[in-house]
Amino acid sequence: MSKSLNLYIGLAAGIGLTLVAGYNFADRNIRSFPDNPPTMGALPAPIPEPEAPVQTATAPAAETGDGGGLVAAAHADEEGKGLRFGIGREALSEEIAAWNVDVRPDGTGLPVGSGNASDGEPLFEENCAACHGSFAEGVGNWPQLAGGKGTLDREDPVKTVGSYWPYTSTVWDYVHRSMPYGNAQSLSEDEVYAIVAYVLYMNDIIEDDFELSNETLAGVTLPNADGFIVDDRPETEYPIWRTEPCMENCKDSVEITMRATVLDVTPDEGATEPAAADPEPTATEPAPTEAAEADSAPEPEAEPAVADAGDASLDPELVAAGEKLFGKCKACHQIGEGAKNRTGPHLNDVVGREIGGLDGFKYSRTMGEMGGVWDEAALAAFLEDPRGYVRGTRMAFPGLRNETEVAEMIAYLKSHSQ
Amino acid sequence: MTKENKGPSRRKFLTSAAALGAGAVAATGARAAGPDPLITEVQDWAIGLGDGVDAAPYGVPIRFEDDVIRRNVEWLTADTISSINFTPIHALDGTITPQGCAFERHHSGAIELAKPDYRLMINGLVDRPLVFTYDDLERFPREQHVYFCECAANTGMEWAGAQLNGAQFTHGMIHNMEYTGVPLRTLLAEAGLDAAGDFADKWVYVEGADASSNGRSIPMEKAMDDVLVAFKANGEALRKEHGYPARLVVPGWEGNMWVKWLRRIEVMDGPVESREETSKYTDVLEDGTARKWTWVMDAKSVVTSPSPQSPITHGHGPLVITGMAWSGHGKITRVDVSKDGGKTWETARLAAPGTDKALTRFYLDTTWNGEELLLQSRAIDETGYVQPTKAQLREVRGLNSIYHNNCIQTWHVKANGEAENVEVS
């Protein structure tokens, strides 16, 4: 053991010349490294080969035998044998290939393959939309992947692939290794290209027929690529805060400007009593955090009172709630004055309209041949489970979440129908 | 007679505050109203027998302490798997965090990885790519160090204002343990670094075995400095939720880099720019540009008691104010405490001299006679860095940084001993 320590001291001395003390180093950012580059050449001596050859694997999934014991013993106890202990075995190329999957901004590490947004849309719907929304808009607290442009300098920026992420390679790397959530590494490489292409398309970065591939990906520059600077605290903060602090008469007066209990968003500890109602309107929403991954506002979900889906009269509150919900539909459907058919048919007068009955819009075959009328029951069934109600519909939207939302949406559609 | 010490929840507090008002304010030395039956009457525990030595082969805290637990904040995250919980720092003392209540942060949940199934690969710009088993790790010379691990988002919910009412929630994304492990430089030397050449522009990319893999790029200089591959914490094996059987320890740097279930280390000629170091763990400034590679956790401290979850319940007279301080730059050298919201400060007593990148406990032994307090603490480290106020941080960074909020915290202690998270001018 004592010899081992000596070896470390040697190592430390070798590179210690150029390594600054730990605390000091911690303040430095990467740009300052080249000032004083430590090199292996500064080591006391070339690292000697181990006494015994490094073990080689006998099988890729070698069981943990203790055959290495000899090797280690041969080293640790001998003098002057350098820094190596002869522990471990050589990694096989198949093993390295299996784990070494990281992709760099210049595209290094990308496997051969390709896909476009059109291929990606159904894949995204199937694998990603449950959390990220059909249009990558994010569901609940799950990350929003599209939109948010121009929000970074506003309160609560929306950080998406299009608004914030600097490198396309990162999207590919992450989807490939970690998505879908709960079923990671289940997608083929072409599927990953296609899904990434869809996310880029939803951010208006590429066209829907752009072939994203190992050759083209590195050339796709994200809008916020230049939006980052290397940690500048050593220049902008440390000089200010490395000063002798005030001890007396540091300010004239002290006022409380904000209280946590006003917000009342702290979890209760006892949890037996019902949470005390605190209807006091708060000036501030609980600030969102990425403590973990909360990319969206926490908004303790104000579940609207359950509405009666059968209510025929137009409740302005329902209509208003439906209008807000309609944000999910806007990417494809227009409604109101001058509404036209887009990806989906316009929805003026949809209540009472013949199903698949709008001239000039190309419906899916099922929808076109269905017959019947969009009454409340039909709309409710369709909005709750589009693909269950109309098999083969081209509408990618996965459906509204509950009866309340359905009632709100129908009220809103009614408000634009005669 | 069983004393139900459930800890003061906000609601239960009212009861104890009432008791306090009803004459419990008796200061030390006051005469008891009558003989205490706990003393004058023979108690059950003094008559019968306690548990045998086989009652708890691995013990857990006594039931009276069952509120000293990790807690999570439901609205923070979409689910509890990719989420975080908080160390009950308001109820702990000393510096070492017991593993069982040390905060957890997972990106794909805490996985179960057995030692026989564990493999650690070193590849990239090395002379010989290697694979180690768990047993292999235990054959390298080991080191022991105590280090704090703080999530970069600790106190992140407080940027915009006082929000969560408890030290556990505002400052509980931290733990401090004694690690046993192998220096990363030892493992890198084993693989041989001739192939890496000049270290100046070299990095190691580290990743875990879980589905998120949580990959991070670390500059070679840090990798060769004090980074450990640890397999023991506080003397025993790491807990599953902290990366069993082996995790990376990156002293002084943000917790996200302390990769759990460590499976691969690649020596590279540049950073990977992984998800965790681009879309996350980067700090948006007021003008919309963002800082990246903000690895160091700056000096910080917090009063853990009294605090919202740990109000004063003992009446007037002697009061121990305590808290903890830490710095990613090195040792804590001094902690000041203010009782008046920062107008005047007095220097607290450090329980022990500060150690490198580890928690330091501080005490201010004082007297309290029911006056309202605006309690603050301010850490100073060996580089002379003084913990800033929230206003100072906002002036440089704006309101949207989320991560690296090391501002001075204020607790408003009221006449009844209750405390609240507040912001002051």
Image: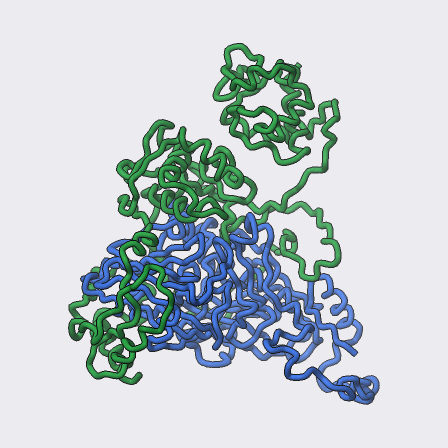
Can residue A239 be seen? no
Please report the residue visible at 46 percent of the width from the left and 65 percent of the height from the top.
B114
- Colour scheme: by chain
Chain A visual colour: green
Q: Is residue A140 above or below residue A14?
A: above
Locate the N terminus of chain A by quadrant.
Answer: bottom left
Q: Residue at x 29, y 47 (%)?
A: A109
Residue farthest along the front direction in this orientation: A58
Q: Nearer the viewer, residue A59 or B174?
A: A59
Which residue is more in the foreground, A56 or A214?
A: A56
**Where residue A373 appears, x then y in whole percent?**
65, 16
Residue A389: horizontal and vertical position, in percent? 61, 26
Count of marks placed on residues: 0
A341 vs B419: above or below = above
- On screen, residue A165 versus residue A180, left or right, reads left
Q: Position of residue B391 (x, y in %)?
A: 48, 56
Q: Quadrant of the C terminus of chain A?
A: top right
Residue plotted at (20% across, 76% down): A51
Q: Is residue A206 above or below residue A185?
A: above
Q: Is residue A77 visible?
A: yes
Instruction: Name the one closer to the observer, A328 or A153.
Output: A328
Image side of residue B361 versus residue A263, left or right: left
Q: Residue at x 43, y 41 (%)?
A: A160
Quadrant housing residue B338: bottom right
Judging by colour alone, the chain drawn in blue in this rendered image is B
Residue A339 screen position, x and y as percent? 53, 17
User: Closest to the observer: B208 or B392?
Assistant: B208
